[in-house]
Amino acid sequence: MLSIIPMLPQLGIGAADLAAAFLFLYGLHRMSSPVTAPSGIFVAGIGMAVAVLASFLYAFGVSQAAQPDLMINIGLVIVALAIGGGTAWWGGRTVAMTAMPQMVAIYNGMGGGAAGAIAAVELFGGKADGMTALIVTLVGALIGAVSLSGSLIAWAKLDGVIKKPLRFKGQQVFNGIILLATLAVGGYLVAATQDKSLLVLAMPASIYLFFACALALGIFMTLPIGGADMPVVISIFNAFTGLAVGLEGFVLQNPALMIAGMVVGAAGMLLTLLMAKAMNRSVSNVVFTNFGEVSKYKQGNIKGSLKPMQAGDAGIAMRYASSVIIVPGYGLAVAQGQGKLYEFVKLLQAGGVSVKFAVHPVAGRMPGQMDVLLAEAGVPYDMIFQLEDINDQFSSTDFALVIGANDVVNPAARSDKTSPIFGMPILNADKAKKVFVVKRGEGKGYAGIVNALFYGENCDMVYGDAQAVLIKMIEAVRGLGLPAVA
Ligand code: NAP
């Protein structure tokens, strides 16, 4: 019985790793529904804390003789945790809803960078000496470094720091050469570790060169991709980061890292495929073609005219309708109009109007942004419908209220083969009996193209900031002084 005592630290680490893995998976499972998502994030966060605890247990479990600088290193880890945790806490609290994609890009890059840093410690310390361990470490280092530099470029594009895609002739070939150079240096590192006589360039210099090539690859892969595709690119890098973390977990023989990495990798890949599907594009089309380059796209002849309407009149018209479908888009998040929107909806419902929300899978600037926005305002989940569940209902609806949305209701996606968004499934708002579009002016959507819906016979434009327009609609409906319908 007493013989188990020396094994206790090891058992403790194993149990903590297992608990962390369970919490990651359970948290992810809860994130699959907007109702349980907030608690899912909390559970996964606890899993992360347990994984950190397991790492501390591991550090104390290894003999003191093997790690003379243990206390200094623990001190450094605590400082790093305080800086990282403090920055993330502050960033998470202050980030604007519209800047979420940038924040995701940065965090993603940090994950890739962390995996690359683990690999660098292993490589420079000469710890990954077996052939398999070395190859796995190098693959993890490559993917982690690509994810770090690529995510930073994605952040810069989303934040408007880099305004235009950088494209030049022979770019794919150039990127191919960088990839080959990275693989060649990696191959050299493996060969030179096995046979010292092959060593022509000092090991540290070769490792630096390997990382430089991998970082350059991430930068040049991402620079030519258009801003509109950045969320998909971030999702790809998210999958990369997971893979890199999983591989480094294998090298360190750390089950929590392996499982977390695999889960992130698989989830990132699934999300990438789902986003590409929602835009009717393939992943290779996103990465290798120039979507978003609309300068060559000639807009077809759009007939009709833009017909402005007063916000109050539009609000009153909807109050007398029997059904309204609301299509929220990126502009609603910009205006932070979700609270006022739900206040308006409750007024309509009090008047007996049937109101539903139609959410497009890529409305906004990141998947799920509209669901989160509506949830923030307290909109019940049973009022929110996804594209495939509601698209048939537009034709029998009195009013479609398109609020801050543009590309996701652009009929060119259905009919204009030359349009950059052709083939993307759209919400059939144009089929409603009457459409009100709320936007500030003649600004284009993310794809940078004109929307024929706005010129349609059945469409009126309600110009103004979404929140200001909603306030006017609420005032107008309240001004009617109508009693609520039981
Ligand atoms: P959108 O096409 O970008 O259009 C947003 C509209 O909102 C603009 O036309 C703008 O017109 C208006 N707007 C901006 N600020 C406003 C404010 N304060 N008040 C009222 N209106 C305002 O948005 P979307 O329909 O949601 O489409 C999303 C786009 O992002 C799609 O092209 C999609 O492919 C792309 N995308 C999204 C994801 C994702 O994960 N969600 C991923 C990749 C790509 P004004 O300037 O005239 O006001």
Image: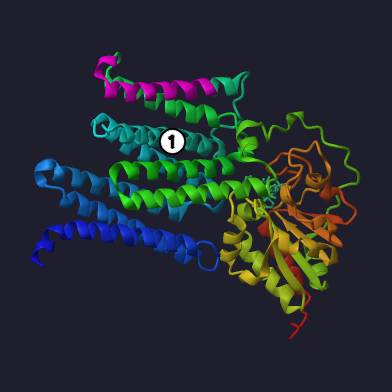
Assess whether residue 198 is covered by the magenta stretch: yes
Q: Position of residue 61 (x, y in %)?
A: 16, 52
Circle 1 is placed at which residue position?
143
Snapshot quadrant of residue 183: top left
**Which residue is painted at 58% across and 69% down in the image?**
378
Snapshot quadrant of residue 73: top left
Which is more toward the observer, 141 or 393? 141
Q: Is 287 placed left or right of 305 in the picture?
A: left
**Which residue is painted at 62% across and 34% down in the image?**
226
Any part of residue 110 in sight: no
Any part of residue 397 in sight: yes
How many other residues sit within 10 Å of disc 1, few (<14), some (14-19) or many (≥20)?
many
* Quadrant containing the N terminus in the rendered view: bottom left
Q: Is residue 143 above or below residue 478?
A: above
Asked if ligand 1 lies within 8 A of label 1, the reply is: no
Assess whether residue 462 is covered by the magenta stretch: no
- Secondary structure beneath disc 1? helix
Which is more toward the observer, 188 or 119? 188
Residue segment shown in magenta: 176-199
Which is more toward the observer, 253 or 63? 253
Marker count (numbered)? 1
Q: Position of residue 469 (x, y in %)?
A: 71, 59
Taking the view exactly as shown, the residue that stands out farthest to the bottom is: 486
Amino acid under label 1? Ile
Q: Is residue 418 above or below residue 11?
A: above
**Which residue is painted at 61% across and 24% down in the image?**
167
